[in-house]
Amino acid sequence: MATRLSKAAKKITAVAFWAVFFSGTASGVDTSLFRLESGLNELIYQLSRSVVTIESSTPVSPKAFRGHGDEAVQSLISSGIIYDLLGHILVAAPAVIGCERIVVRFGDEIIPAQMRGIDHQTGLAVIHINRRIGVPASFSSREGCAGQMVIAMGNSYGIPACPSLGFCAGFRPDGTIQFSSPITSGTVGGGVFDLSGNLVGLITGGIGFERRLEAGLAIPARKIPNIVRHILMQGDRPVGYIGITTANIEITPGIKLKPTNMLVNAGMSTSRLVERGVMVTAVVPSSPAERAGLRKGDLLLSMNDSPLRSALDLRNRVRQTFPGTVVKLGFIRNNTPYRVRLEIGKLQFDPSQAFFDQPPTQFPLRLSEDSLRSEIESLKRALRRLEKQLIDRK
C-alpha cells in the first residue's frame, strides 16, 4: 500500500506543478487537471481502505423522550482507523465510552467490536474485532506539519470515508494538531492524511460548534503507537483532574513578595517578583479542588513546591499526575498565603459531551470580560496590601 500511495502522491505533485507553471494552452491545463484529479482519486481510494464507520449505542430511559415505550436506544455514528491486521481499530474515546454495543461497518460488513482500553490523556480508544478487514494505516513520523496540505477522511452525514482537503495549521500548546477542514461528529475518529498517504493524526473533534466550525483537532500520529502499546499491555491510561478552571493574569507593575514562614511552605524560599499568576476562575462542585478548600479568586503559586509558570503548566502537571496522588498547592487568598494538600482525582469522559465546542477545559467557563477584569483588579489590591504588611513587619 505504501508504494501505491507514494506513486500516487508523486503523480499528484508532478502534475500539479506542471499544470500551474508550464501549461501554455487551455487543452494542456485541462489534461493536467484531469491527471491531477485521477491521482487524487487513486490516493483517496487507497486511504478509504483504512477508514471504517463506528456505530455505538447504549440504552437510555424512555422518560427522556416524549411518547411511550419500554426501551429506548441512543446511537452515535463516528469513524475509526484500522491499526493492524490483528483487528485493532483506533477510535475517539467519547464516541464509544459507556456504550453497551459497538459495531464496525466496512463496506457491506457489520462486525461486533469489543473495547480494549482508553487513553484518557489524549482521548484515544482502541477497540477490537475478530476479523481482518481493510488495510492498516501508514503512520507519518514527521515532527511538524505547519502549512502542509492534508486530506481529512471519515464518515460525513452517512457517507463513509468522505474526503475533504485542508491545511495543517501546526501544533497547539496541548500537543494536538490543528487543521482547516470541514469536520462533523461522524468524522471524529477518522484520519488526517498527507499527500503521501501517511496518517498525520486521528481526528478528535473541532474548535467552535458543529454549524460554525473554526478548525479541526487531531492526535499526532507519531504518538499513537506508544499509546496503543500501553493500552494493549496495561489497559486504560488515566488522567489527573482537580476540577478548576484558571486564567493567566499579568500584574503591572509587579509586586515583590518577601518570604514569610507560610510563603516558604507554599514553595517560595526566596524573594519573588510577582508579575503574573494563575488565578482560579471557577471550582467544580464536589471536585477534589473544592474538597481541598480552593475558591474562585485564589492565586495559585506552586505545585509540590515548584513555581507554576502558567495555567497550561498547571493543567499539564495535573493531567500527568496519577489519580490518588496527594500534591501540595501553594496560593494566596485575601492577603494571606496558604498551602493545601489535594488528592488528584480521575478525569472521566462524558459520553454525552459534544465534539464541537471551545477548546476543552476542566469545567465550562462563562465569565464576562468585565467580571474577569474586576477579579484581576481585586487581586492586585490584595497583593499590594500583602506587600505593605510584609514591609511593616520588618
Image (cartoon, grey):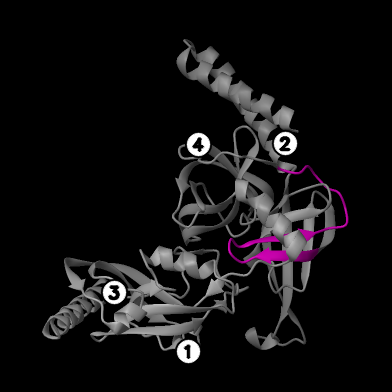
Secondary structure under tag 4 reads: loop
Q: Position of residue 335 (x, y in %)?
A: 23, 85
Mark earlier in primary sequence (1, 4): 4
Mark earlier in primary sequence (4, 3): 4
Magenta includes 393? no
Secondary structure under tag 1 reads: helix
Q: Looking at the picture, which amino acid does disc 1 mark?
A: Arg
Dividing the picture into quadrants, the one containing residue 59 is: bottom right
Mark earlier in primary sequence (1, 2): 2
Magenta region, residue range: 114-137
Front residue (pair 156, 317): 317
**Real-space Cα distance between discs 1 and 2?**
53 Å
Name the residue: 46% across, 15% down: 21
Q: Which residue is mark 2?
A: 46
Q: Which residue is mark 4?
A: 148
Q: Which residue is mark 3?
A: 368
Q: Which residue is mark 1?
A: 291
Name the residue: 55% across, 70% down: 321
**Real-space Cα distance between discs 1 and 3?**
26 Å
Q: Pointer 1: residues within 10 angstroms few (<14), some, or many (20+)?
A: few
The numbered dot on residue 224 is none
Horizontal arrangement in the rendering, residue 279 relative to residue 170 (left or right): left
**Real-space Cα distance between discs 1 and 4?**
46 Å
**Real-space Cα distance between discs 4 and 3?**
37 Å
Q: Position of residue 389 (x, y in %)?
A: 15, 85
Secondary structure under tag 2 reads: helix
Dividing the picture into quadrants, the one containing residue 353 is: bottom right
